[in-house]
Amino acid sequence: ADKNVLDRQNMEEIEEALITADVGMDTTMKLIGRIEANAAQISGPEQLRTFLKQEMRKVFENVAQPAPVAETPHVVMVVGVNGVGKTTTIGKLAFQYRCQGAGVLIGAADTFRAAAVEQLTIWAQRADAAIVAHRENTDPAAVAFDTVEAGISRSIDRVIIDTAGRLHTKVNLMEQLKKIKRSIGKKLPGAPHEVLLVLDATTGQNALAQAKMFHEGIGVTGLILTKLDGTARGGIVVGICDAMKLPIHYIGVGEAMEDLQPFDHEAFIDALF
Amino acid sequence: MFDNLSDKLNSVFKKLKGHGKLSEKNIDEGLREVRMALLEADAHYRVVKQLIADIRARAIGQEVLESLTPAQQVIKIVNEELTALMGSEKEALNLSGAMPQAVMLVGLQGSGKTTTAGKLAVHLRKNGKKPYLVPLDVYRPAAIDQLKKLGEQLSVPVFDSSPEMDPVEIAQKARQKAPSEGCDTLVLDTAGRLHVDSELMNELSRIQKAIEPSDVLLIADAMTGQDAVNMAESFDQALDLGGIVLTKMDGDARGGAALSIKAVTGKPVKFIGVGEKTNALEEFHPDRMASRILGM
Ligand SMILES: Nc1nc2c(ncn2[C@@H]2O[C@H](COP(=O)(O)OP(=O)(O)OP(=O)(O)O)[C@@H](O)[C@H]2O)c(=O)[nH]1
Ligand SMILES: Nc1nc2c(ncn2[C@@H]2O[C@H](COP(=O)(O)OP(=O)(O)OP(=O)(O)O)[C@@H](O)[C@H]2O)c(=O)[nH]1
Ligand SMILES: [K+]
Ligand SMILES: [Mg+2]
Ligand SMILES: [Mg+2]
């Protein structure tokens, strides 16, 4: 193979494809570095794509395994910045669990945003799940505690806790999230079994900071990538999964209850570039 | 200004300079740092390409080559180009035309439209207007409740929509009802939608035709990545936007989306959202935005 086959134009095209998919400068440079180190085996644009896809596949295969569902209730806490799709995703998740025959109880621990409880209540009805809600502006940790307690006493299979959107830079709000998590653990040692971070596919490089700060703050176990039904490709998760070894559980592809799909990294990579 | 980038440029140029004047090649080395900073801030790939070409043309047109402080000189050009692209004059809400006037808010899902509607009601009231909040989102669960609650908190009247109604019909009825509610300015909160959803984009055009709002604002999330160009272009094509509101600027997103949106629509950023509360709306400052994008 000839190193010159990968001319400047090929590399620029690859760079543009990766950057415009929000893969980010660092990850793009890293991938280009891998191409250069393996240039001897890459003999043209087609092989270049194949090689890149293979590198990305490695990233998604090299992540942690999701926690098994062993205990009843299995408690899932859902977190993320404002407006990414947490509440909607919880509605979709509850529906999936219900379809699998599990009993589902949702905790409305977003006590801040106007009509957050009303929104979640509608989703619970749609998914045929139960809900625990307090009044607005009450302590979200108390809601979470009560939800887990109700889950235990009613022998419910799955408990999902919704939380208010918060920017990862707001220290007091991140502290509040830790408190919610602690109060869940106080009621049920070992819970929450999963902490899912919701990321919006339209988000650019800031998603990396979000993932880092939420992970440092409360220990994220997995990701959900929403709004992939638009033209944004969500490339930021390549760098996030590479750096943090977190699995992506689901993708959101619309606003309806059925619009949640398991993450398929082959399909994702194919759509990426 | 731009300390971070200055340091980087200084070290690049110091390494290269040695023998007197900088060459074009030296400038390109420096511009690579600028390009990197812009891409890391989420400015769109093509927008950055054009910007760098413009900056380069000025930089090698004597402005930098001969300079004793080339890094400062490059920074100055970068700053001027960014600020010029972002728009140098402040632009207020357009509230011209027949009473009652209307401001229409549009954008992708979750960008902050409903929250911004509340904030704008506060802003309008401060400026002697009598706002009327109008919920046109008949799709998202509890979207109407959300705006009603905000109105209640703010003591601003909210039109009593229900999810069974058609958004165009709601808007028309609200306009008829505004005077009897003592209101002179409608704030239309539309449902979030994808720019590729032609049916819902069409709905926006129908609302616009029926109401002829004096201003149509695209509510865009400051964290938006490369897709900002596609999104903004589509909304502008469908509606001929009057301006932009950049939300969630209270976080640490560098906000390169502002550059992308400005480059494809040419429309001014009129406000920024800096928090979840109803008073968290500020004027836009292009120069501050330029330094933020460059991460200084
Ligand atoms: N197109 C599309 N829209 C989505 C998707 N997921 C959520 N949305 C929409 O995004 C908007 C925000 O969703 P929410 O579920 O309210 O987001 P959230 O994270 O709970 O928001 P906060 O609680 O305010 O932080 C709503 O209009 C949803 O319908 C998705 O996968 N695709
Ligand atoms: N931190 C911060 N949060 C904001 C800002 N503007 C809006 N939000 C939050 O972003 C989330 C979404 O805001 P909404 O106003 O519901 O967004 P929307 O565009 O109406 O959403 P849809 O109607 O579902 O499309 C909420 O949690 C808001 O509190 C802002 O400037 N800063
Ligand atoms: K968003
Ligand atoms: Mg929510
Ligand atoms: Mg809304």
Image (cartoon, coloured by chain):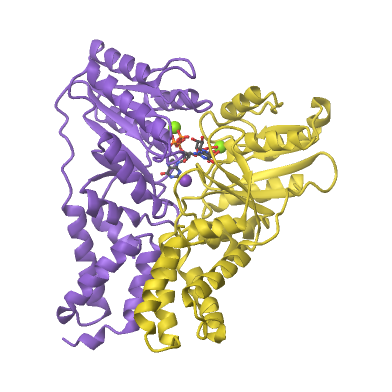
* Count of labels in the image: 0
Residue farthest right in this picture: B98
Residue A125 point in image, percent of width and height: 42, 23
Please tell me in which quarter of the rendered image ligand 4 is found.
top left
Q: Nearer the viewer, residue B119 or B68?
A: B68
Image quadrant where residue B20 sits: bottom left
Residue at (50% x, 80% y) in the render = B68
Q: Is residue B191 above or below residue A183?
A: below
Residue at (61% x, 30% y) in the render = B147
| Chain for colour purple | A
| Chain for colour yellow | B
Q: Is residue A64 above or below residue B291?
A: above
On the rendered structure, is A80 left or right of A45?
A: right
**Does the image show residue B234?**
no
Residue at (16% x, 52% y) in the render = A62
On the rendered structure, is A243 left or right of B144?
A: left
